[in-house]
């Protein structure tokens, strides 16, 4: 996983509530056995008109947002299915950071597994950023993970909270499984104790 | 010891190590695996040269992609076929038990776990699927994870977690006749909203919950995620133990007695505190129908499509307008006037034997409306077999329903069971998102009884008054 330290990039706005992972990447793209190449499926249905042609109005079809690395959106982003294909597709498009007033739990967690920083800001701050993006072409933000800060071109800084362990893993690009494997002796001790208390939990599945 | 909630007891039993900041290494007892969210996890293990820590704690089954038509013929879609083959290959390589596509025990992952006695009270259970919350019906802590965490659990049998908050959803009283667990959970989501449970584990309590069968409790817990909660649970009781006893993977003999004695402790202690409490009266819950593109966009069958102009919040108004447009409805339209093209009875929410018995009892002796195409997809091969032994398949077929093989089918339409653009479906599944059942398709979530009545009348009817 790539580390996330600071990011300065342009912002793409998706002004919708409750964007679910079925919209982020529809089912037909879940048949892959790879993590890569999912950009084509990102917002597949929303990108298109009813006749199947590309909708030039949709934000990701607008030339000004092609290079965006920061996605700005509304409450409960990533609700629904646990599909990790959603963050994979966003990453494939070039997004490394998502700003929203709230996220769905599983999606939020999946972002951290893939080097994407999901940032929760207040609703009023998100609204101000939407207005900034609308007013200025090429609106850029700087995200500083160490300082837990989002800075606007005008110099306004918004602070965000983040779990210290998740922050550290993302900042250093750590292999989460490798970290847990370092605790193998504790896991073995737990299993031994638990097996004596509740042996039915350790019956083999067959 | 301080009074504890059911959730706290199970959580505390699974802490391998807790850091001062609350970061917890949580032990996972059981792991369900399916073909869609696992290939990249197995690939990750291979690349890193890691082996599963306890392959005998996992059970795999293909369900999302499988055809629900004749299984003797090869799968028409080569990409689906490859994903299913990849699951087969991975299970063989890594030593994981697999119920293959032609195994009678194959079915929707959240149907077969309970059916086999794989799902037991007090366990931590995960799966790369958000509807893993279903297993909480047994008093287990069960939640959906992404593919990276599937790999993490395979490699370590643990997950790094922060302790979620707890929410009690208390439903007291008696449900109206013909109202079911599906109506209860849709009403709860309508009340708390689709993000109301974010950050929480829900425990469902109250007399109306205790009166539910295991199938009903599974329906209830299944859709916790639609209210934003990763997990929902019901304390185990004699109904739970009676359901589990004698199932193939359930403990037997002295081990059974020891297990039940332990499971009887899995209740919330008097005086234990939840972080939030929500209360509903069962009598006030009408048969529910979703009208929009989010499960929280729901009302009673005696209600109407809402008018966005009456909504103060601009973002909510826009979302409502967009949903009504997508669904091709009009504000103020009575729900009963909505005509449907398709009916889907199935999914991890409502495809168990009790659901099918109930649906058949309403279908018996009636005919599906000429304008409607209706299908029944059992949750597993064993549910299908049981239903056929009881003659339910004949009732459905005589009424004009198609009778299919087990799988996820039109709940998410990854296989060939897909809505065409503009088609409108009464569905017993769990998600009414745009395009969920097929691009341009329109989904109304309902109970099995409501789905059958809609199939026969061609539009929604109030099942309480339907003869």
Image (spheres, rainbow, N blue to C red):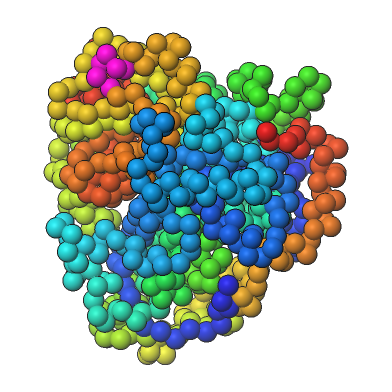
Q: Position of residue A88 (x, y in %)?
A: 46, 65
* Residue A101 in view (yes/no): no
Residue A145 is situated, as x and y percent measured from the top left of the image, at 55, 79
Nearest to the observer: residue A11 or residue B129 = B129
What's the residue at 33%, 66% (across, down)? Answer: A40
In this picture, which residue range is highlighted in magenta?
Answer: B396-401
Residue at figure coordinates x 47%, y 19% from the top left: B385
Q: Nearer the viewer, residue B254 or B274?
A: B254
* Lateral position of residue B124 relative to residue B369, left or right: right
Magenta stretch, main secondary structure class: helix
State the quadrant of the C terminus of chain B.
top left
Q: Is residue A154 left or right of residue A88?
A: left
Q: Position of residue A48 (x, y in %)?
A: 21, 62
Q: Viewer-proximal residue, B158 or B281? A: B158
Q: Can you give x and y, in whole percent of width and height, for residue A190 in the image?
A: 82, 49
Task: Give the residue displayed 75% in from the left and 58% down from the top.
Answer: B18
| Residue B409 part of the magenta-drawn span | no
Question: In this rendering, is residue B140 above or below B18?
Answer: above
Q: Is residue B5 left or right of residue B314?
A: right
> Residue B49's quadrant in the figure?
bottom right
């Amino acid at each position: 996983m790539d580390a996330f330290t600071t990011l300065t990039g342009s912002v793409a706005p998706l002004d919708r509530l409750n964007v679910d992972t079925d919209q982020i990447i529809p089912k037909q793209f879940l048949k892959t056995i790879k993590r890569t190449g999912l950009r084509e499926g990102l917002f597949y249905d929303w990108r298109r008109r009813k006749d199947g042609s590309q909708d030039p109005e949709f934000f990701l079809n607008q030339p000004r947002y092609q290079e965006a690395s920061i996605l700005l959106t509304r409450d409960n982003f990533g609700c629904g299915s646990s599909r990790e294909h959603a963050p994979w597709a966003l990453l494939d498009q070039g997004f490394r950071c998502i700003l929203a007033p709230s996220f769905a739990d599983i999606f939020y967690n999946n972002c951290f597994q893939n080097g994407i920083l999901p940032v929760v800001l207040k609703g009023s701050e998100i609204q101000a950023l939407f207005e900034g993006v609308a007013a200025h072409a090429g609106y850029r933000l700087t995200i500083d993970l160490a300082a837990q800060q989002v800075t606007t071109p005008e110099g306004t800084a918004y602070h965000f909270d983040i779990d210290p362990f998740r922050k550290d893993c993302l900042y250093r690009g750590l292999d989460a499984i490798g970290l847990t494997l370092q605790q193998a002796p504790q896991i073995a001790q737990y299993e031994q104790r638990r097996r004596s208390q509740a042996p039915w939990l350790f019956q083999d599945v067959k | 010891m301080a009074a504890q909630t059911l959730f706290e007891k199970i959580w505390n039993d699974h802490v391998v190590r807790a850091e001062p900041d609350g970061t917890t290494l949580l032990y996972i007892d059981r792991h369900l695996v399916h073909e869609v969210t696992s290939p990249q996890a197995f690939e990750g293990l291979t690349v890193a040269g890691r082996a599963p820590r306890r392959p005998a704690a996992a059970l795999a089954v293909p369900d999302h992609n499988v055809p629900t038509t004749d299984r003797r013929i090869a799968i028409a879609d080569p990409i689906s076929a490859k994903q299913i083959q990849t699951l087969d290959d991975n299970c063989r390589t890594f030593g994981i038990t697999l119920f293959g596509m032609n195994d009678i025990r194959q079915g929707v992952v959240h149907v077969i776990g309970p059916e086999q006695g794989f799902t037991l009270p007090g366990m931590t259970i995960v799966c790369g699927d958000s509807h893993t919350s279903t297993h909480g019906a047994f008093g287990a802590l069960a939640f959906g994870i992404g593919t990276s965490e599937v790999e993490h659990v395979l490699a370590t049998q643990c997950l790094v977690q922060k302790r979620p908050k707890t929410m009690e959803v208390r439903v007291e009283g008696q449900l109206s006749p013909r109202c079911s667990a599906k109506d209860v959970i849709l009403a709860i989501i309508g009340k708390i909203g689709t993000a109301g449970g974010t950050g929480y584990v829900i425990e469902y309590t109250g007399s109306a919950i205790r009166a539910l069968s295991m199938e009903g409790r599974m329906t209830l817990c299944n859709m916790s995620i639609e209210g934003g909660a990763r997990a929902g649970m019901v304390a185990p009781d004699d109904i739970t133990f009676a359901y589990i006893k004698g199932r193939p993977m359930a403990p037997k003999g002295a081990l059974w007695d020891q297990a039940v004695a332990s499971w009887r402790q899995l209740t919330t202690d008097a005086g234990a505190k939840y972080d939030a409490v929500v209360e509903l009266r069962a009598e006030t819950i009408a048969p529910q129908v979703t009208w929009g593109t989010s499960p929280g966009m729901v009302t009673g069958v005696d209600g109407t499509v809402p008018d966005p102009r009456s909504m103060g919040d601009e973002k909510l108004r826009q979302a409502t307008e967009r949903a009504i447009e997508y669904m091709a409805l009009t504000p103020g339209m009575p729900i009963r006037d909505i005509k449907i093209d398709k009916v889907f009875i199935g999914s991890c929410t409502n495809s168990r034997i009790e659901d099918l018995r109930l649906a058949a009892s309403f279908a018996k002796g009636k005919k599906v409306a000429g304008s409607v195409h209706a299908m029944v997809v059992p949750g597993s091969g064993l549910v299908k077999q049981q239903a056929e032994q009881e003659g339910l398949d004949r009732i459905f077929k005589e009424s004009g329903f198609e009778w299919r093989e087990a799988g996820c089918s039109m709940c998410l339409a990854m296989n060939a069971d897909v809505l065409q653009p503009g088609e409108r479906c009464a569905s017993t599944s769990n998600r009414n998102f745009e395009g969920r059942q097929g691009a341009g398709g329109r989904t109304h979530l309902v109970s099995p009884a409501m789905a059958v009545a809609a199939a026969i009348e061609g539009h929604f009817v109030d099942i309480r008054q339907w003869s």
